[in-house]
Amino acid sequence: PHMMGGRGGYPPMGGRGGPPPHMMGMGYGGPPPGMGMGMGMGGPGMPGMGPGGPGMPIPLPNPMGGDFGPGNGKRVVILNLPWQTSWQALKEFFSAAGNIARADIAIDETGRSRGYGTVRFTTEEEANHCINSLNGADFQGRIITVRMDKYQN
């Protein structure tokens, strides 16, 4: 009679009181998952954001313009330049065709020549004379192409 009773006075493990174990962490009291969240956010069309609305970027008029305004047919582009050509050598060579306002060599992000450059003359006549007289010329051992720069405006 003594040995009985060791088992039985206590409630079985797995407890009473509180929700059943499989209900733990299910978030009672709130809306079902995925509901009620994000409703009413960004309703019909935000004002001012339509196509062509305020804040549209204005395209730049001259992608290669830099700090020297409209060209009006005074700038020529020279292709097939040797890598080592400097803008000074370019200006010196092309000064035979007329008065040069500016000479540039295009360079990449590493500082190396990209093999072409531009020369701006003070008049359209000089630019046209340059194209007629120097297109196909030998410049530092290479045959260069000289034409009107289509990116000027």
Image (cartoon, rainbow, N blue to C red):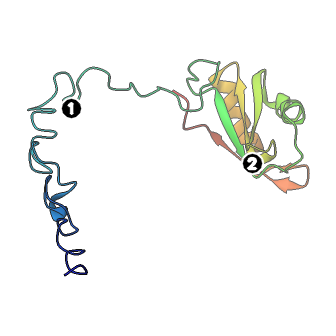
Choose between 80 and 137: the one closer to the eye.
80
Residue designated by label 1: 51
Residue found 67% across the figure and 35% down from its top = 76
Question: Nearer the viewer's eye, disc 2 or disc 1?
Answer: 1
What's under tag 1, amino acid-wise? Pro
Residue designated by label 2: 114
Image x and y of residue 77, in percent: 67, 39
Image x and y of residue 86, in percent: 87, 37
Q: Is residue 18 left or right of residue 69?
A: left
Q: Quadrant of the N terminus?
A: bottom left
The mark nearer the N terminus, 2 or 1, is 1
Image x and y of residue 2, in percent: 23, 78
What's under tag 2, amino acid-wise? Arg
Query: Does residue 76 sit above or below 32 in this rendering?
Result: above
Q: Residues within 10 Å of mark 1 (few under 14, many from 20)?
A: few
Q: Is residue 62 left or right of residue 79?
A: left
